[in-house]
Amino acid sequence: MNPFRFARLPLIIFGGGRISELAGIVRESGNIMLLVTGASSFTGSTNAGNILGQFRDNGINVHHITVTGEPSPEVVDEAVMRFRGQKPDTVVSIGGGSVIDAGKAISAMLNTPGSVKDYLEVVGSMEHPGTKVPFIAVPTTSGTGSEATKNAVISCVGKGGFKRSLRHDNLVPDIALVDPGLTLSCPPHITAAAGMDCFTQLTEAYLSTKASGYTDALALEGLKAVRRSLRRSFAHGDDLGARSDMSYAALTSGICLANAGLGAVHGLAGTIGSMYKIPHGAVCGTLMAVANEVTVRELRKISGNHPSLKKYAVLGRLFSEKERKNDEYYIDSFIGCLQEITDELDLPRLAGYGIGVEDLAVISSKSDVKNNPAELPAGILSEILAMRL
């Protein structure tokens, strides 16, 4: 058996209606709370009034900040400067992955000197000490799984931009409160992008060169939920059963990526996200089918019996409705399934975000795909990108 390391987890509270427990949980730590949410995604939701009413009824003093898009160093630093003097007992993020990352970073910097940029991987020069204000993550989308990870992704978009993580074992949320009911109002295009991000994370973690028996078992359980409910949650957003499946899959994907790493799709998505204003889930979704198609092609060049091809066959069996004995059939079936889902969810092409042929070499040269099951040099990465222009 190969050696492995498994990261710590938050206390996970999962299920419909569990949001009713949030105020009581917060009150256990004190009565001063910093609430981090999206702008219209929270304030315009039907849940906002009930949640804020809970806090009021429990005597909690709420300081509220809204964030839009992926958090930048400036957004985190400004929030820390603004609220450090309030000495919050708890930081709570209610929102999608970017909102959770923002809250995670803010909680980590409230008691830490300097700018968050000083502590980012590659960009900064200092190691974060792991100190934080207690942090609770409450996801309202089913995508990144940030409610279960120890890193917060911070972005600076444009020329010389970056997309890097603030990372420490202690930055795992203290509590992940996952109530699928909060995702019912998620619009179809966000449901699609978030769902494909989750699908990609589970698939890449399963195929990763760092995968273990533990992460394989979790990834396959999450993928079963994706098989049942990704398409249904997109087409029937009011189906709580489908939403529950996808919330479970997203949570599981976060646990898997934290322990097995990711592959070509996320390597490319990280670079693209630092250069263009494009939703992370949309990049993952649009690249997933073609990246896996090319990875399979390269694996077959190495050996028709490559262990990762066996794993692709397992995925094909999971998503196929037909009984066959041939692994090759199931491998191709899985790639075909990914193509069908890409079309069905109407995932955008890269050109729609201003990416052109002339940009592909730069994107490819900056992308890290080291955990992908097949080595993909820059030229092949450019080929993958070109297939989705």
Image (cartoon, rainbow, N blue to C red):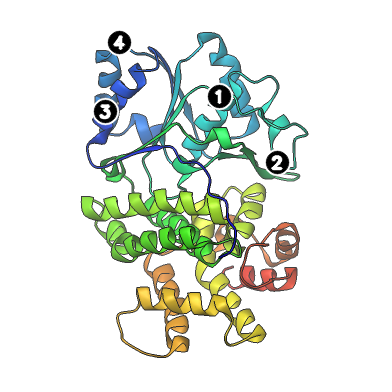
At 59% across and 73% down in the image, what residue appears?
387
Q: Secondary structure at mark 3?
A: helix
Q: Residues within 10 Å of mark 2 (few under 14, many from 20)?
A: some
Residue 217 locus on image (x, y percent)? 42, 62
Residue 210 locus on image (x, y percent)? 60, 61
| First in residue order: circle 4 vs circle 2 | 4
- From the image, tell me which residue sits under label 3: 21
- From the image, tell me which residue sits under label 4: 59
At 58% across and 88% down in the image, what residue appears?
304
- From the image, tell me which residue sits under label 2: 121
At 74% across and 57% down in the image, what residue appears?
366
* Residue 223 position by quadrant: bottom left
Labels 3 and 2 touching (C-beta < 8 A): no
From the viewer's perspective, is the residue at label 2 or at label 1 nearer? Answer: 1
Q: CA distance from mark 4 to mark 1?
A: 23 Å
- Quadrant where the N terminus lies? bottom right
Q: CA distance from mark 4 to mark 2?
A: 39 Å
Q: CA distance from mark 2 to mark 1?
A: 18 Å
* Residue 344 position by quadrant: bottom left
| First in residue order: circle 3 vs circle 1 | 3
- From the image, tell me which residue sits under label 1: 132
Up the image or down, 280 lies above or below 327; here it is above
Q: In the rendered structure, which amino acid carries the disc numbered 2?
A: Glu
